[in-house]
Image: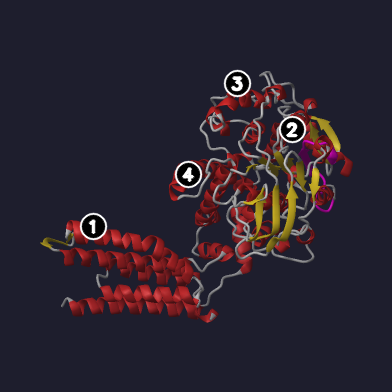
Amino acid sequence: MRNWIPEERGRILAAIVAAAGTVFVRDHLALALLWLASILILWCQGELRSAIHFLWRIWLPLASGLAIVWGLIVRGSPEYPDARGIPIGLDYAAITSLRIAALASVFQATLLPLRGFQRVHFWSRLGLPPSAVAGIISIFDLWPEFVRRVDQVVAARCARGLMTDRRLITRVRQIPFAFRTLFLSSLDSSMDRAVRWQSERLPERLVKAAASRGGSGSISGSFAWITLAICWVAFAFRHHLILNP
Amino acid sequence: MISMPTESRISSLDNLYEGRGGTLVLLQGDNFSGRSTIIYLLAQMAVDHGELGIVIPTELHPAFSGVTASVADELELHLGPRNSQSLFWTLAEEWGLLALGNRQPLTLSGGQQAMLSILCKLALRPRVFGLDGALEQLDPRNLSRVLEALSSRDVFSDPSVSFISHNGPWLEERMPLHTIPAENCATPCEDPKPPGMDLAEFAPGTAVSSALEFKNASFRYPGGAPVFSNLNLHLHPDRIYRLAGPNGAGKSTFAKLLCGILRLTSGSLSVNGKPFDPYPQPGTLAQLHFQNPDTQLFGTSVTGEIETLPRERRASALSFAGLNAVQRRHPFDLPFVLRKRLALTLTLHANAPWLIFDEPTVGLDQAGQRAVCAALIKLKQSGYGILLISHNPSLDDLLAPEILEFLTSAQP
């Protein structure tokens, strides 16, 4: 299995090729294929749950919104300003949704499986300086920290008797307090940490610790991923040319 | 206006910085005597000399790197690659931190977080190491472990020096410390100190007596091992209980169950003989004071916080906390002690039959601790049930609580 995991530069190069192709390709089948391939890679790396979570919570509402706006309200596409009709609007919504799904899956397949020091190793192998690596890693850790903080706010408001039931409307009313606390505490923590990072030479320690663990991929994995990405781009353009000679 | 002593008012720091290699210095003094400022200035002196000066504050979250997802990674980041011959990795094992390997640092209990941050920062071999109230969350065994490490020449070699700010006489009983009154190194602050807590102003309401009974109660976090199983327990109103147990045993978890923040996995709770589930109605049976006040303050001013209390208790609550002069200020603009007092006051005046206090005396000097204890006794006399989570032995002397020793195994 390890042989099919790419090393850092192969991983990012394959992702760039696939992402660039996604932006330019306008073909439902090709985009759907890329999406499915990325989901398959995520499944092989034990990250299917995250992919489904994204599709259900973010992509599905977004895709529905696009279908309503372009298909039912605008009834057209910005790509064909002279043509009107529900099918044209729906087609544009579908291609945009597929593009978003494919891009997100490529991003997830590239970065999600990397954990802890693997993630540090990934960014430092791309030649970024230690301070930039530490900054990027801390950004990736922001979301789990936000989730924890929101839980903390809800717990604290329950503990003070400021949230005396669990109805949806009561939970919605807690949002401003969660946001305010998130903003204040995150800003405060960031300032404190920035000072500590500098004096404790944390970025250098971080990169050193990750280097001592080593990378997780192989050259053969990199070759396989890059080849797959190039093959997909070639297929996508060829298929597009066949459909639009 | 309240202000801490400024740098210009503090003298004799050079002696502290230079002269105490390898020893533990305990800075003694009341709140606002300048202890914290002295510790931070000493750490800054180390930085100015091109060396490392580290202070671990009472609020521990900034002490973590914020870039690791597990205790194991946080340890490796600070201690270097795992090595059984390494002194600090041996300490990590002895302190029980290796057993917490996959947990996220911020999900640990307060005491476990303190142990982790102390070990990580010690491993960086700082020239000045300050502990500003961080030891107050440790159980007696962990407290002894840390003091032993700090006084060990292997861990903390000459000319390094550690400074401790701690509100309790019991520290000196465990370890010979070089004790220095903060007033000896800081000239008095010209600005008036904020008034202390005024017990005469404390006017609790009257609680509906609520006897609690847990039957075969069990709890586990999703995907985790049981925190406790088949617990059978009677808690009588009009009494003060103290939950005893090591750091990470699940004391705060038990408090969260009573408040309705968490829900029992199995078993039942009854109130005055009737089944009751606090989860759908959080905060109605019990309210909880968290050990870190910052997680519990939401208002944009002290007055805004006080206004969440019943109208008839607001004026007395403000006077009791000694916060009249700062009532228009944002809570996060106040020093830690005043934020702690504010959060404590909110729970002391809360409208629930059971009030739970998680480390209520952290950061408070002796006078503050006595005032809080006297308020707790008044609450008990007014029919409230009180549950304490604290490692401060002074509370046992002042309150003579009933000790609940049912939580004895550390949470995995």
SS at circle 2: helix
The residue tagged 2 is: B381
Give the extent of the magenta segment.
B153-171
SS at circle 4: loop
Asked which quadrant contains residue B57, the reply is top right
The residue tagged 3 is: B325
Q: Name which residue lies at 54% across and 47% down.
A: A154
Which of the two discs, 2 and 3, sits closer to the camera?
A: 2
Could you tell me if the residues under marks 1 and 4 are in contact, i.e. CB atoms within 8 Å?
no
How many angstroms separate mark 4 from mark 2 (CA)? 34 Å
Could you tell me if the residues under marks 4 and 2 are in contact, i.e. CB atoms within 8 Å?
no
The secondary structure that most of the magenta stretch takes on is loop
N-terminal of the two: label 2 or label 3?
3
Q: Amino acid at mark 3?
A: Ala
SS at circle 3: helix
Q: Which mark is residue A174?
A: 4
Q: Amino acid at mark 2?
A: Gln
* Quadrant where the C terminus of chain B is found in the figure: bottom right
